[in-house]
Image (cartoon, helix red, strand yellow):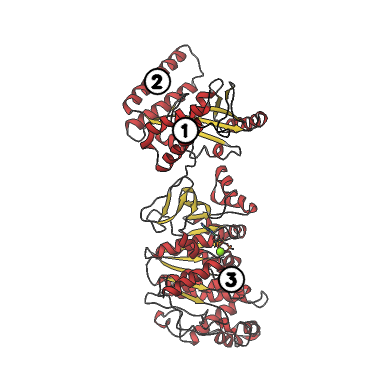
Amino acid sequence: MNPIKYFFEQSKYALNDFNQRIDSKGRGYIKDSLRKAEIAKLSPDDSLVFEFQNKGKLIEIDDRNIQSYMISEFPQVIYPNWLYDLVNYGEPIVISQFIKPLDSQKALSGLRNRITNLSAQFYEKAEKGKMHTIDLEQAIADARSIEDSIVRGVEKLYSMSMYLKLSQENVSKLLKSDKALKDLSYAKQIKLHQLVYKQKQGLETFLPNVTDAVGEEFYLTSSNVSSSLPFTTATLNDPDGIFYGITLGGEKIRFDRFSKASKNYNGIIFATSGAGKSFSAKLEAYRSLFRGINVYVIDPEGEFKTLCDYVGGTNIDINPESKTKVNPLQFFSSDTDTKEVMRTHLGVVKGLLKIWLSEDAYNRGIVSKAVNETYASKGILLDDPSTYSKKPPTISDLIKVFEKQGEEGKRIAVELLEYSHKGEMGDLYDNPSTDDVNFNSPMVVFNIQKVPDQEKQASIFYLSNFIWQKVLSNRNRKVLIIDEAHLLLKDESSANFMENLVRRGRKYNLGVISISQDVDDFLKSPQGSVIAKNADTALILAQKKQSIPSLVKAFDLSDVERDYITRLTKGQALFIKGNTHSHMFVYATPHERKLFSSNAEDLAKIDEQRKNEQ
Ligand SMILES: Nc1ncnc2c1ncn2[C@@H]1O[C@H](COP(=O)(O)OP(=O)(O)OP(=O)(O)O)[C@@H](O)[C@H]1O
Ligand SMILES: [Mg+2]
């Protein structure tokens, strides 16, 4: 038969009968094919007319060999996204599904008949003394449980049929694809039936006229049907949340970091370089600001500056040349300070010394004594919170106290000179904080891009401590974004500090978002592993191959998810919030894309635009 005529008739039917059901894009598509078919009819064009041959096992259209299948048995257990492997099976495959709601009353009477039949079979076997009735018992139990959930209104019953179509340019390729498809479906416990001598009907099920010409139906409950839609992924659509992206099926992902259901407010972002870690964190930061959430950032690459300037935040430049100075020994006091806060602060100062001093010189007892004495020399006493707001000591003050602690103290003092104005790092560390270091704007970014690399770890450490002190002073909702967070995990004291920060943040409405490209380093550290596993959200973007096994283990990922994360491209992610795992794309508007970009040209454009607006 003339295939054009065939398709034309089908399309016309589709257009008349299903006009309302198809969106405008679909309608345009059908109109377009109708128009082409009309043209072809009037003046047959070689490129449009092709031979349509039904060869029983396959159909040949033009030079393509097409083979259709129906699914004749679903896997025994239908789990969410079980179709994923079939959809992502490397060969060109088309899947067609027909889903029809069934009237509950009719469904129930059908089910009850089935239960009666099965029960009769069971009793007959039992009477004859046959032992092997497990299959029957299982079928009765299944039918009863479906009946139960329909009666309670928890589930509805649907009929579903499903067909697959393979298409290849020659028969040998088609046979190869056929074998691969059959192997895969066997492994997934899906029974496929090739539509022998029903190829034409098979082909019809793929036309846009919604005709199930084969009619091999199954009855499934709503939850099984929803698990059987390709591209379905768990969605997260919290109306109180920020819009984060879209699932592969096109649904919105909105999540509220501070929702009551969250076990804590922390998150981690893992990905290889350039996969979109900072981009995603900026997107969350920007959209969180609109919801009145304060944002603090420790920014080792100077990537948040443009966004911070754009939203009118405070960008604090920390580097030896900067006019802004931050004293790492500073204590930011508030009315609510307790001894515990000061103890943590003194612990951080001692931890910093551990990072700075050589192993030989470091002496825990002397360090502890000297730090306490240095603060006491400025009138700041652990036992008296009213003294906490006094002017804090500087590194030079600390060195003077070490010099009085015998030979070992002197040795420490000598090593510390490097961090004072007598050494190279004095401009960075040995200064009272300047007045422009304030936390009063909704977004505060500590830009440590120009801090020498070997000092980045210490800088992230004392800056997180400042932010922690600030966090304790109020219960507003806030997030702290720590980029390159694995640096904090390199040292015992900073790692413990970070774990503590993450653990205690919830009480103070703080969410800590730790970003790292060194997944293995992060997860290998005992504190890092606790931080990652307990975070309420995890955004896993494109990964290096070698990081995959540790991620699979840490987040208990399924085979499907492991497969998915090996193939991610920029912006695509597996997003885990609580128990929900969503396959998504972190979606930004074109304007936001420029704003969050790390590309110098985009950033220059945004800066220029801002200047013009001022
Ligand atoms: N979801 C996305 N949508 C659009 N573009 C994106 C997305 N994610 C990332 N990009 C693009 O990729 C670039 C690199 O992303 P990003 O700066 O976030 O990488 P990164 O993971 O932080 O890398 P690094 O480890 O080098 O800091 C961005 O400048 C942006 O242009
Ligand atoms: Mg980055």
Mark earlier in primary sequence (2, 3): 2
Q: Which residue is mark 1?
A: 38
Asked whether the viewer can see residue 73, the reply is: no
Dot 3: what SS? helix
User: Is 87 located above or below residue 293 in the figure?
Assistant: above
Label 1: how many residues lie within 10 Å, few (<14), some (14-19) or many (20+)?
some
Task: Look at 38% across and 32% down and name the residue there.
Answer: 16
Please identify the quarter of the rendering in which residue 401 is found.
bottom right
Task: Look at 48% across and 65% down and name the residue there.
Answer: 595
- Along the viewing direction, whichever of 438 and 7 lies nearer the viewer: 7
Please identify the quarter of the rendering in which residue 179 is found.
top right
For the residues bearing labels 2 and 1, Cβ distance under 8 angstroms: no
- The answer as to whether callout 1 falls within 8 Å of ligand 1 is no
- Along the viewing direction, whichever of 282 and 604 lies nearer the viewer: 604
Q: Quadrant of ligand 1?
A: bottom right
Q: Residue 457: which numbered mark, if any? A: 3
| Distance (Cα) linking label 1 and label 3 | 71 Å
- The answer as to whether callout 3 falls within 8 Å of ligand 1 is no
Query: Identity of the amino acid at label 2?
Result: Arg
Instruction: Give coordinates of residue 41: x percent, y percent.
Output: 49, 30
Asked whether the viewer can see residue 531, the reply is: yes
Dot 1: what SS? helix
- Would you say 521 lies left or right of 44 here? right
1 or 3: mark nearer the eye:
1
- Along the viewing direction, whichever of 94 and 297 lies nearer the viewer: 94
Q: Which residue is mark 2?
A: 114
Query: Identity of the amino acid at label 1?
Result: Glu
Query: Identity of the amino acid at label 3?
Result: Gln
